[in-house]
Image (spheres, grey):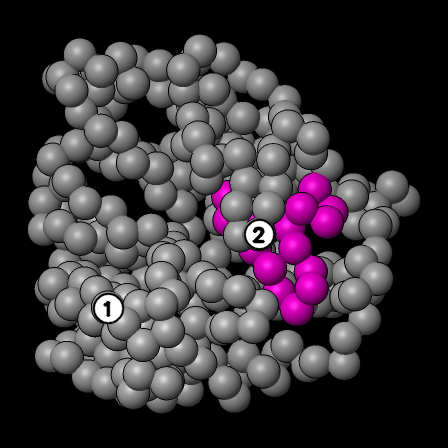
Amino acid sequence: MLKSLQQNIEITNLSNFKTKAFTKYYFEINNENDILNLKEILEFAWKNTLKVLFVWAWTNMLFAFNLFDWIVIKNNLKWYDYNENTKILEVYSSEKITQIALDLENNYNQNIWHRFIWLPGSVWGALFWNAWCFWLETENNFLKAIVYNLSTNKLETLTKDELNFSYRSSLFKQTKNYFIIKIYFDLSKIVEKYSSDVDNIKFRKELQPKWNSCGSFFKNPSKENSAWSLIEWVWLKWFIYNNAYFSDKHANFLMTLKDNWDYKDLIYLIKLAQEKVLSKFDLLLENEVQIITN
């Protein structure tokens, strides 16, 4: 047993759904020196046939277990610097993207990330999923990322051409073979379609719930078919099953009525929505939120 690993730790609050969950082994990365422990932790995991799960601020995950029999590694790397002359943003991966967007506007009069205000999650998550907000995608300003390769146990620098960006996806989602340490963005690049008259802050306040949810649960099957409209068409908006329900504000927001509840209620509604939409429209709703199982 490694001294660096804590045992039998509650991780309920590491997911916005806050379903009751524990992990057998737990480790936190609070600074770059802690990254040096990853090699021995990964070797310990391999020798003992243990899975490793990385989590970060406001994680976009549903814990579908009571006890995770493997290792959870929490990323706490936070700090950023914005150079007003070069317009380069350097940021650690666990910084909350909405806070950075607010700071850029309030402290630097820089509104290029205005669309990311009130976007839940970390910079890691935004890059992992290539977050999209009213025509602004994370990839638009991405420059490079400093990562720890979990296979080679070496530090690497990845450029935009290597990240294989697509709609709600990136290399990090496709391979899950990297721990993202630090990211660089070029905020001098302006997205033409970004000049929309949508007030995203008002939109999120009025049309999106904020608590006990991980944001939009399903991907949109196509530009013509939004997940929320399909869920409404099968009469599941504001449908409640025990402690879980689809929001009355936005049907693609899966919610819980109380914290520390059983994940099984959420899983039931997820499968119900997928079955009904597939039956009525012959369209498969794919999860945007990761469902983590043992």
Q: In which quarter of the image is the N terminus?
A: top left
User: For the residue marked with disc 2, what is the amino acid?
Assistant: Tyr
Q: Quadrant of the C terminus?
A: top left
Q: Name the residue under label 2.
A: 167
Looking at marks 2 and 1 on the same chain, the residue that comes earlier in the sequence is marked by 2
Using the rendered image of the protein, determine whether residue 98 is visible from the camera's viewpoint. Answer: yes
Label drawn at residue 68: none
**175 or 66, which is in the foreground?**
175
- Comparing labels 2 and 1, the label whose residue is closer to the camera: 1
Q: Is mark 2 on a helix, strand or loop?
A: loop
Write the residue at 84% across / 62% down. Answer: 192
Instruction: Pinpoint residue 213: horizontal percent, then vertical percent.
Output: 34, 69
Total numbered badges shown on the rendered structure = 2
Vertical comparison of 292 with 46: above or below? below
Residue 154 part of the magenta segment = no
Determine whether label 2 and label 1 are within 8 Å by CB.
Answer: no
Q: Is 130 colored magenta in this rendering?
A: yes
The type of residue carrying mark 1 is Glu
Callout 1: helix, strand or loop?
helix
Relative to 25, is 94 on the left or the right? right
Residue 95, given in percent of the width and then of the height, sits at: 53, 49
Query: Percent from the top left, x then y, of residue 35?
Result: 43, 23
172, 222: nearer the viewer: 222
Give neighbour class at mark 1: few <14, some 14-19, many 20+ (Cα, 10 Å): some
Q: Which residue is drawn at 42% across and 26% down?
A: 177
- Looking at the rendering, the stretch of residues picked out in magenta corresponds to 128-142
Find disc 1 in the rendering and name its residue: 275
